[in-house]
Amino acid sequence: MRRVLQQLAPVLRLTRVTTAFAAVANVWFLILWTRAHTVNELPEASRAFQDKPLWMLLLAGAGSALGLFAYGTSLNDVTDLHRDRAMKLDRPIVEGRISPEAVVLSVAGSLIVAVLGATAFGTMGVMLTLLVALAILLFNVLGKFVPAIGMVLLGVIYAGHMLTPNVGARFLVPVWLVMTHALVLAGLTHRLARRSPPISRRAFVFAALGLAGVSAVLGWMMWSRTGTLWPEWVSPTAWIGPAVLVGLFAALVVRRVRTLGVGPRAAEKVSRYGSLWLALYACAWLFGAGQLRAMAIMGALAGAGFLGMTILRELYALGEHPVGYRR
């Protein structure tokens, strides 16, 4: 058992599967939301969406989300190799616990899985998946080293990936919330971890303007598709749950920072809870819309993700530092 864990640990760490469920949550939410509001959400060209079994759509969405997430994280380790050799000696590639050939296979294989999963959502879903993959490549080459661009690009990646199941979605407020959450979380963890280069005032202003610009684009898309920013077929109180969660997350961040102080540990905690919050947002939107069955599915995913995250972290720690007896 220990030998198996030691062999799997580098792959698990390379792909960071402990937080991948957040990407699945975003995609599953749009699938469940679209199925619940088929008449209002699906354009005529995408009516075939409703004829496919829900389990097939969820399975394809999970494959697409996990594939694209693993592609991004593996690509991150490839592009950061020289930097990790100087600053992060515990990374699997630097330690030699996973070969460069295996990393290349992980990048290519995960992208193939993402594209195959997206085929269930039609040509537009595949095209958007490839565009998001390109954005991820740009983020790893440029965005990480220019925080202002990186934060905006990361928000766009989250929004684009979320829209993969239904590119023509008409109610885009949940997409905007996820995009904003991802952008703010990226900037917050960057500051908490004291990463280099630091976020300057100019970078902060650029990121704020970028967020405003992308928000305007989403607003224009929604207006052009529905003629309003809040369609009448969406409950006027559906925003309450997500708004409460925003406040709770802010309080959680303040509490964690006060307890742990500023540093990498606080950044890691905030990042982990920030990933969990995306699934909670989805549950809140579905509950506000009265879609209790869909909310139960999302709740099960959130619970499974949190449990899996905990178990995998413990298994990884056990493989790295097995329990022994003191003499």
Image (tube, grey):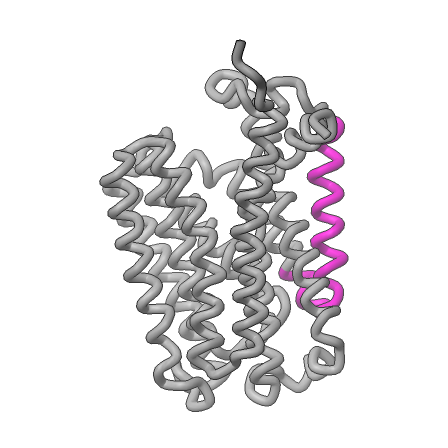
Q: Is residue 191 above or below residue 67?
A: above
In the rendered image, the vertical position of residue 40 relative to residue 312, given as above or below = below
Q: In percent of the image, x 27 and y 49: which residue is there? A: 205
Residue 245: percent from left, percent from top: 35, 64
Which quarter of the picture shows residue 301?
A: bottom right
Toward which corner of the image does residue 234 lie, by quadrant? bottom left
Q: Residue furthest front?
A: 327
Quarter holding residue 149: top left
Residue 203 falls left or right of residue 109: left
Q: Residue at x 49, y 61 (%)?
A: 279
Residue 230 lies within the magenta run: no
**Residue 63 or residue 225, whichever sits in front:** 63
Q: Is residue 204 above or below residue 172?
A: above
In the image, is residue 13 above or below residue 49? above
Q: Give percent across and percent down for residue 133.
A: 62, 50
Is 201 on the left or on the right of 243, as rendered? left
**Total count of labels:** 0
Q: Does residue 114 belong to the magenta stretch?
A: yes
Q: Is residue 189 visible?
A: yes
Left or right placement of residue 129 versus residue 4 in this view: left
Magenta segment: 101-128
User: In which quadrant will I find the N terminus?
Assistant: top right
Residue at the far top: name it.
Answer: 327
Residue 122 visible in the picture: no
Q: Residue at x 70, y 74 (%)?
A: 54
Majority secondary structure in the magenta region: helix
5 sits to left or right of 209: right
Nearest to the observer: residue 204 or residue 310: 310
Name the residue rendered at 58%, 19% in the picture.
Answer: 324
Q: State the image coordinates of residue 21 (x, y, percent, origin top left).
A: 57, 53
Image location of residue 191, percent across then percent down: 31, 37
